[in-house]
Amino acid sequence: MLAQALVPIKSLIAAKSRLSRVLSPVERRDLALAMTEHVLSTLANHPDISAVTLVSDDPAVAALARKYGMNYWLESALGCSGLNAAIAHSCDVLFTQSSQPVVVLHSDLPCLEASDISTVLKHLQQKEGLVIVADRYGLGTNLLAFGAESRPEFSFGADSFSRHCTSAKKLGISVKVLRLAGVALDIDEPQDLELWMKRTKRKSENNVKPTSLSIAVCQQGAFMRQRYNG
């Protein structure tokens, strides 16, 4: 099954403010950029993702779109306000251009793998409806996949997972919830960063290189600050 991907991206400079206790502003930007590049590279190299659209007002994201051969839409030019409205409008446009389903996902998923995308598309093809992947706490929504007939009401934000499930059922849309480790871990809080560090350490012990040097540097900076700051 071929699908198109939609990735809304906040300003990389202002990203990850909740990590300010353990990362400097430069490290936070480097972290956000490295994670975004990891997600975009994963999508760009997936054989079943036919096109990727990035929605952001950050000029750095426009440069990434050019680097990876992706579409770039200025969020401020969409004529709507807020993340959910921007996603809804973007999906409406995408469905006028193609009948392929849409995968909406965040850009801060450092453990995302091609197999995660394949699993999502496999279940979407088998059952259609709406595929939801929550964060590791089961509270937020890190990925949605759906066809035009199963387009949900977007409710990204605090406790979005339950709202997406509830609203879909009210609309008569069948829901498939997947638990995927590569999608569940997004980096918002210091404890998320520490868990990611542990996973990366295990991979390095198995001779799997980190995604990028920038990520490794950020991880080490966070690790030292957490230990020294208590």
Image (spheres, grey):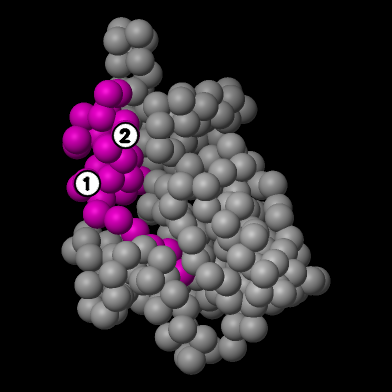
Amino acid type indicated by mark 2: Arg
Q: Image point 58% across, 25% down: which residue?
A: 202
Residue 13 appears left or right of 103: left
Q: Nearer the viewer, residue 143 or 225?
A: 143
**Residue 183 in the figure: left or right of residue 37:** right
Amino acid type, label 1: Ala
Q: Is residue 17 visible?
A: yes
Q: How far across and how far down the image is residue 158, in percent?
A: 46, 47
- Residue beneath disc 2: 18
Q: Position of residue 203 (x, y in %)?
A: 57, 30
- Of 8 and 86, which appears nearest the observer? 86
Few, some or many residues within 10 Å of mark 2 (<14, 14–19, 20+): few
Q: Is residue 96 left or right of residue 165?
A: left
> Does the image show residue 204?
no
Between the residue at mark 1 and the residue at mark 2, the CA separation in whole angstroms equals 10 Å
Q: Is residue 226 magenta?
A: no
Vertical position of residue 37 compared to residue 66: above or below: above
Q: Residue at x 58, y 37 (%)?
A: 137
Q: Residue at x 58, y 76 (%)?
A: 151
Q: Check contact, mark 1 vs mark 2: CB within 8 A.
A: no
Q: Is residue 230 above or below residue 53?
A: above
Image x and y of residue 156, in percent: 46, 57
Name the element at disc 1: loop
> x and y percent of residue 153 in the render?
53, 70
Q: Quadrant of residue 71?
A: bottom left
Magenta range: 6-34
Query: Camera-side residue: 143 or 84?
Result: 84
Residue marked by disc 1: 14
User: With 126 as the anchor, is 133 left or right in this view?
Assistant: left
